[in-house]
Image (cartoon, coloured by chain):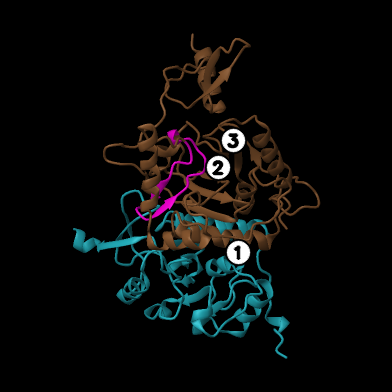
Amino acid sequence: MYRAPSELLQAAFDDPVLDAQQSFRAALKALAEPGTRQPLAVVAAVDHLQAATYALCLSLLDNDTPLWLAPAFDTPAIRANLAFHCGCPVVEAREEAMFALLDAAALDDLSGFYNGSERYPDQSCTLLVQLDRLDRGPALSWQGPGIDGNRLVGLPLKPAFWQQRAARSDFPRGLDALFCADGEVLGLPRSTRIGDSLAEVA
Amino acid sequence: MNAHAIPASEAGYNFAYLDEQTKRMIRRALLKAVAIPGYQVPFGGREMPLPYGWGTGGMQLTAAILGAGDVLKVIDQGADDTTNAVSIRRFFARTAGVATTERTPAATVIQTRHRIPETPLAAGQIMVYQVPIPEPLRFIEPSEQETRTMHALGDYGVMHVKLYEDIATFGHIATSYAYPVTVDGRYVMDPSPIPKFDNPKLDRSPALMLFGAGREKRLYAVPPYTRVVSLDFEDHPFQIQQWEQCCAICGSGDSYLDELIVDDAGSKQFVCSDTDYCAQRAQQQESRP
């Protein structure tokens, strides 16, 4: 029987109740005001699962949420800590995942992740995406619920991500993403409409 | 544990009453609700220590979002001092140790039964609505299967038939509360039994709106700055209630008024339904020389 090696385990949130609450509120605000950066609770990173991404995992995942791990996060230490602190099943099939833990390299292909049905669009997969930073990418104009007019957001993402997102979007079906870096989270719900790049607008 | 982070709260209960796994379940549902504005997300509603109809849906949402730094305001039909408002406010003061207020601008979370405050809401505030029947199509179509399909297809013609029947019978749209709205051009939503007077306050509000129905186990949301349009017809445009009277206490001519019978002869007075708004206005008038 597989047993998580206990020497791989490390402490999670200092305050499991209030740190989880603060991280959830950051995620809620990030999705309610797409494109804004919200500070998450502080926690020690596990391998290359950064503090911000890990804080979201700790606040949102439990035994009800099958998780898909991108290859970069599939390490014994990350598996052991997620198993202990969240208790979430790690699934091999993308279709079964309620959450997916992705890095930038995994964004070229979003096929397989469930984007909900017309009758139950809420059952779609939520993407937790760890990036190096949340700015200094090509500025795009975001519009839609949560945005007063439009907002210029410069996520450092390749065009392939936006093509993949568009291919999986058919509102109300779609994928919601929470991008994490440097202790902050930035939300991109399916309801956000991406306009022309700044260059094209100017 | 950060001892400083949790103020004195009722012993024997988790922070804000609900257990952490229940909070996570509600929180995940809230994230989906915000991502699909106006869509009703099913959630595993818990029994709360008060009966359905007293705001159990709103309380579960408040319990899931509340943090130690929040300032909570609770209103019932606009009033901070009625039984429902007092008991829910006290519940969270005891189980979460959070600060409470009656002042709208001072609150970070406002749980409400059937009103939106008159004082304009600010960015960063969260409104939590108590909802009895979340499904706007329910009175027309009793089957959940059918209403779910209607929402999936955006098949809302029947809502206009209902409003048209009002016009055919009464000469005007007689629906005065829980007046249906379209959210961001897609989902038709029940704004909870707020008077239609409050509907325009939902449109492009800077605050985040969360709706919770405990008995029906549904929650839904309207993010800030979202288009919320009340259903109407070109020749019968949406209109809000108006009064010939002003508030008997503060003299306001533009707030939602409650009618009071003040003596055995049936004399009437009209006063603001929003007690905080009214008290602030009255105080300002007194302090003026």
Q: Residues within 10 Å of mark 3 (few under 14, many from 20)?
A: many
Q: Position of residue A188 (x, y in %)?
A: 41, 63
Task: Give the quadrant of the N terminus of chain B.
Answer: bottom right
* Side of B133 where A108 appears, left or right: left
Q: Amino acid at mark 2?
A: Thr
Q: Which residues are magenta?
A: B177-197
Secondary structure type for disc 2 = loop
For the residue pair B199 and B109, the one nearer the viewer reads as B199
Residue beneath the point at 60% across and 47% down: B58
Judged left or right of residue B162, residue B97 is: right
Q: Which mark is residue A59?
A: 1
Q: Nearer the viewer, mark 1 or mark 3?
A: 3
Inspect this view and state whether residue A39 appears: no
**Alpha-carbon distance for marks 2 and 3?**
14 Å
Give the SS element for disc 1.
helix
Q: Image point 54% across, 54% down: which residue?
A: B219
Residue at far right of view: B12
Q: Amino acid at mark 1?
A: Ser
Look at the picture and state if B30 lies above or below B256. below
* Residue placed under numbered mark 3 in the picture: B75
Instruction: For mark 2, name the chain.
Output: B
User: Which quadrant would residue A64 be assigned to in this image?
Assistant: bottom right
Eye-nearest disc, 2 or 3: 3
Chain containing the residue with disc 3: B
- Mark 1 crowd level (few <14, some 14–19, many ≥20, 10 Å Cα): many
Q: Is residue B78 visible?
A: yes
- Chain A representation colour: cyan
Mark 2 highlights which residue?
A: B108
* Image location (x, y in percent) of residue B63: 64, 51
